Image (tube, rainbow, N blue to C red):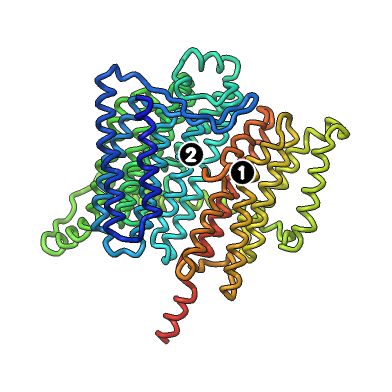
Amino acid sequence: MDFYLQLFVLIPLIGFILTIVIPNNEKIISWVSLSTVGIHLLFSIGFVAYWLFNKHTPIDLKEFSIYKSDGYNFFIDLYFDKISAVFALIGAFLTFLIVAYCRTYLHREEGYKRFFSIIIFFYVGFNFIVFSGNFETLFIGWEVLGISSFLLIAFYRDRYLPVKNAVKVFSIYRIGDVGVILAMWLSHHLFHENITFQKINDASLVHEHLLNHSYTGVIIALLIFLSAAAKSAQFPFSSWLPRAMEGPTPSSAIFYGSLSIHIGAFLMLRTYPFWEHQDSFRVLVVIVGIATTIIAILTSRVQSSVKSQIAYSSIAQIGIIFIEIALGFDNLALIHISGNAFLRTYQLLVSPSVVSYKIREQFYNFVPHTKSIEESWPKKLEYSLYILCLKEWNLDSLMYKYLWNPSKKIGGRLNFLTFQNIYFISIPILIIGIAFDLNQEFISPGILEYLPVFFAFIGLSCVFKAFTERNSVRLSWSLVILNHCFIALAISFNEHFDNIHHVWYLSGVIVSGIIGYLCIQRLRKLEKWISLDQFYGHSFEHPKITFLFLIACLGLAGFPITPSFIGEDLIFSHIHENQILLALFTALSFVLNGLAVIRIYARIFLGPNAKKYNGKTQRTL
């Protein structure tokens, strides 16, 4: 059984590699993709059936340790229980259905191969999450889901709105990443190990550790809920889901109708034994679920787009699912998740046809609507709710007002950080910090205590500027690299952080940074002007540079393709439990540097091609 559990991850991973290397031929691509998910579906059905008829006890498989040192062990762990079984079957069946549907739906589409590669890539991440046995393994899949969502929303990358909404959705996903990262950090300190989900199911073990650390337990639960709410579009993050519908209809069905949107509920189910005795937290989940359900139901009733109506209806149902989980009805929640996933997939797939049916009905069989329940309400209340729902309760405006706009204002105050000045300001500070680190014995303990926070703040300032820079691409890219260097320097002042940890963290950063910088320099020679003031769409003329720069962006953002992904976990393992400010600055740095590099990629390579657009304008004139 242990060996077969590995195949849940290996089959889609092999399929993804094949879709990358095979030639751009529709028949071959569709055959490889359909075979991959078809084999996975048959295997899932067989494995779950065998597991059910053989005691159906949970399976925990510690795969291998990637890096191990004193008090630290980064290992891949796979876990299988009833939650994994339900999500595995739902995922396998619906992915097979979508892949079969897309073979014809996307016929002769320009990005045919790209679409199927991203879908299989998404399925790799989905299986990493569903079969994860610890937070580290789950976070690998969590990151894969985030980047595959971005790529699929921006699938029509020559259009402005899909690219803009893809960046917006990715920014919300990065907020969820903060919750997972900080929950991993605190769980390391709470359990003094990389805790597995099998151990979290041990009530006596959890109670023993929470007995004298109840405050830490509440913070971990809140961070988990933050991640789950962001991923499942719960209040106040509900407004991103309709924006995600800019991608092809099949990707909307599998991502935001069935699988990805329920991952937050999966995280809550998986960690339920940890927070089930925190009554105040459970009340909070219920309140947020009720608020989400009411807001989503009312908003869905005024949407003019079929896909937006389905999106808000799905959000409302997931709000109810969160309530069921908080009340302890896990089996009911699993049934509800299954029903909602299949229903929303069906609704999204037939949504283009529904529009034509409705138009035909209005022409030939129009029947005025009967009185609705809203008409019995006081008119002021009815009209106020109508306006609020049309504006989607201003959730987007609130996010901009209290989150993104302050970040832009901070970055705007750092205009002195020009491409020339960073060599005269940031690099000397970095060199002085390294000198302090090498001579810690000569520094007073009072000063030494504040140095990690100081250098982490300098790194955060660099990435704030990188996130808001609108002119120099090289400046923004260089500041992200400097941010990583300052974070590594800040943590190096804590004990037990040695040079091998720097290698794990900075090796991927340096290599990715050099590759990305070379791509930028090459593009500057080929194009007259590149900046970050608009979307330039250079992927139209430079697809190879586009792909290489995307890989560099992922490496620089700590995506699990370089050692930097493990390095990020190492960084947090050395932050003390009482260094809350240092942990916050570091987490914000990781979030913003991911947003900064994706923003650079989107601005340079995605959107309408500037020269192609101008050419059309001239011909029209």
- Dot 2 falls on a residue whose secondary structure is helix
- Dot 1 falls on a residue whose secondary structure is helix
Question: Where does residue 53 sit, x and y in percent of width and height?
Answer: 24, 20
Residue 297 in view: yes
In front: 454, or 144? 144
Name the residue at 59% across, 35% down.
569
Query: What amino acid type is highlighted by mark number 1?
Result: Leu
Query: What amino acid type is highlighted by mark number 2?
Result: Ile
Task: Rate crowding at label 1 as few (under 14), some (14 to 19) or many (20 or more) other CA atoms within 10 Å.
Answer: some
Q: Choose mark 2 or mark 1, whichever is in front.
A: 2
How much space separates mark 2 and mark 1, taking CA atoms? 19 Å
In front: 223, or 14? 14
Left or right of residue 532, residue 305 in this image = left
Disc marking residue 140? 2
In front: 193, or 172? 193
Residue 387 in view: no
- The residue singled out by tag 1 in the image is 588
Q: Looking at this rendering, what residue extends furthest in the right direction?
A: 442
